[in-house]
Image (tube, rainbow, N blue to C red):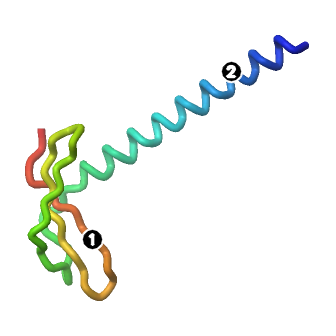
Amino acid sequence: MMEASLIAYVVFLLVMGILVFQWTTWKRKKRLGRTPSSVPPGFIRTEEVNIDPTTGVHQRIWYHPQTGERYYETLNKF
């Protein structure tokens, strides 16, 4: 009885780990894959450039003063 519960718990943890990994991978691809033809209206260019340490992708940061929203423009893609 105890062994079956332990096996079920380990399987549950593995499934949850796989789901979290897939979700974070999907979110990352979605974030880095956004490349509209132009910056949305109302955004002001900042001098900030973010360099992702894991992929090396450079992103220019744009700021919307009324909403506080930030927009990340991908400068180079590998």
- Give the Cα separation between the discs numbered 1 and 2: 40 Å
* Residue at x 24%, y 67% (from the top left corner): 71
How many discs appear? 2
Quarter of the image where one finds residue 74: bottom left
Q: Indicate whether 36 appears above or below 21.
A: below
Q: Indicate whether 15 appears above or below 41.
A: above
Q: Is mark 2 on a helix, strand or loop?
A: helix
Extreme-bottom residue of the structure: 66
Q: Residue 10 carries which label?
A: 2
Q: Residue 70 carries which label?
A: 1
Q: In this view, does 37 lie to the left or right of 31?
A: left
Residue 46 is situated, as x and y percent measured from the top left of the image, at 12, 73
Quarter of the image where one finds residue 73: bottom left
Residue 76 is situated, as x and y percent measured from the top left of the image, at 8, 48
Q: In this view, does 17 lie to the left or right of 50?
A: right
Q: Nearer the viewer, residue 39 or 13?
A: 13
* Residue at x 20%, y 83% (from the top left corner): 42
Binning the other alpha carbons within 10 Å of mark 2 as few (below 14), some (14 to 19) or many (20 upward) gives few
